[in-house]
């Protein structure tokens, strides 16, 4: 598989005042999806891109990173997924990664996007992006997975592979603080993340914990293999210090995809929140990869 390694740089200041005044700062909007309230951010005039946030968070946490995507020439749509950020929860019968993927397809229709979109997903949002790409192939131009759930392996012990579903909660817990809140940037990242995560938990604790269970048990190897067979352009990004999405899980995902383009950074699970400028630089390379894949031929339709 192809690969690029990019070192993590220093974090930018807490407030990017130039971006806040510029056209690359997202506008926060409201719409309805399947008759229920939905919140999202939007900015830009380029090719359409949909960004899906990680578990427990919402679209506004990523605003500084997303502004860099707009600067790179994308028309960014960043929905708050159901149960987060003020978007109404999914009905109980649809509360699954597939249900989330179907919701994103309905969201794309609700905001009037006509062209196939570049779909990007971080962590839990990556699992949703995989389901969307699998179930709604004509909506998706290319897929970017950022420290994404979906690989079935948690760890190898000799010749034995332990699955993510076998991973005990305590192991998630000991890595969660350092991976989500890197010490070097904690004073910049922690207050924003905590504010949004606590708000999401208070608003809808059921969706909060349901999504956690989905992320913990996510095994999307069959869906990833199907995307490989279709020839969908996929770029996989991973932070080398990510202990939530382990190296074994990351490599499992890459094997299922066959030979995806891979970009690694010297960061933790939340590296794009800690250093949005670095994220912008990485995504400039990723967009070049996607454009090259597009010029190589059309993505095959699903059978």
Image (tube, grey):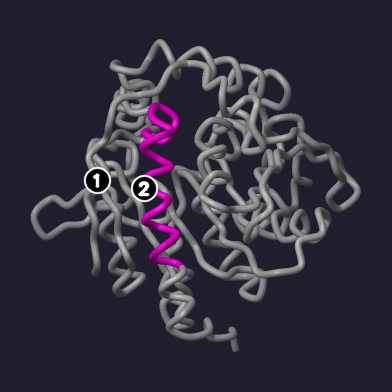
Reply above or below: 56 against 291: above
The percent coordinates of residue 134 (x first, y second) are: 56, 70
Residue 8 spot, x, y in % from top left: 27, 35
Residue occupying image coordinates x 27% and y 31%: 9
Q: Is residue 278 magenta?
A: yes
- Give 162 or 129, whichever is nearer the viewer: 129
Q: Quadrant of the C terminus?
A: bottom right
- Relative depth, front residue between 109 and 178: 109
- Vertical arrangement, residue 94 with respect to residue 80, above or below: below
Q: Secondary structure at mark 2?
A: helix
Q: Any magenta on residue 98?
A: no
- Which residue is depicted at the point 40% across and 23% down? 12
Q: Is residue 295 above or below residue 22?
A: below
Q: Find residue 77 and report its horizontal and vertical position in percent.
A: 67, 48
Magenta span: chief secondary structure = helix
Q: Which residue lies most toward the right here? A: 35
- Side (left or right) of 287 relative to 24: left
Query: Could you tell me how many numbered marks the image carries?
Result: 2
Q: Earlier in the sequence, mark 1 or mark 2?
A: 1
Q: Tell me whether the residue at label 1 lies in contact with that at label 2, contact meaning CB atoms closer than 8 angstroms.
A: yes
Q: Residue at x 71, y 42 (%)?
A: 42
Tell me the crowding category of disc 1: few under 14, some 14 to 19, or many 20 or more residues within 10 angstroms, Cα based: some
Which residues are drawn in magenta? Answer: 271-290
Task: Determine the residue located farthest toward the bottom in the rendered image.
Answer: 303
Can you identify the residue that label 1 sits on?
6
Query: Quadrant location of the N terminus?
Result: bottom left
Within 10 Å of disc 2 (Cα), the crowding (few <14, some 14-19, many 20+) is many
In the rendered image, which residue does mark 2 sit on?
282
Helix, strand or loop under label 1 = strand
């Amino acid at each position: 598989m192809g690969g690029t390694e990019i070192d993590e740089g220093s974090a930018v200041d807490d407030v990017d005042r130039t971006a806040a005044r510029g056209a690359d700062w997202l506008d926060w909007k409201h719409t309805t999806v399947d008759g229920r309230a939905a919140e999202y951010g939007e900015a830009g005039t380029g090719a359409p891109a949909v960004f899906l946030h990680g578990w427990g968070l919402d679209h506004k946490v990523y605003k500084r990173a997303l502004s860099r995507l707009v600067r790179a020439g994308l028309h960014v749509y960043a929905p708050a997924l159901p149960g987060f950020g003020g978007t109404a929860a999914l009905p109980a019968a649809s509360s699954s990664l597939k249900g989330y993927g179907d919701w994103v397809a309905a969201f794309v229709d609700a905001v009037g996007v006509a062209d196939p979109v570049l779909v990007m997903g971080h962590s839990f949002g990556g699992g949703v992006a995989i389901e969307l790409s699998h179930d709604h192939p004509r909506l998706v131009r290319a897929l970017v997975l950022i420290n994404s759930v979906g690989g079935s392996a948690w760890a190898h012990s000799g010749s034995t592979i332990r699955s993510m579903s076998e991973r005990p909660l305590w192991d998630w817990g000991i890595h969660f603080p350092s991976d989500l809140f890197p010490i070097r940037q904690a004073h910049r990242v922690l207050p924003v993340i905590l504010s949004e995560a606590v708000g999401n938990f208070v608003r809808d604790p059921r969706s909060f914990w349901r999504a956690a269970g989905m992320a913990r048990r996510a095994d999307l190897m069959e869906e990833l293999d199907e995307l490989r067979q279709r020839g969908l352009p996929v770029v996989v990004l991973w932070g080398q210090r990510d202990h939530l999405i382990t190296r074994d899980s990351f490599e499992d995902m890459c094997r299922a995809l066959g030979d995806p383009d891979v970009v690694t950074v010297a960061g933790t699970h939340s590296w794009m929140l800690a250093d949005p400028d670095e994220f912008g630089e990485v995504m400039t390379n990723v967009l070049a990869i996607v454009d090259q894949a597009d010029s190589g031929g059309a993505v095959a339709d699903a059978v």
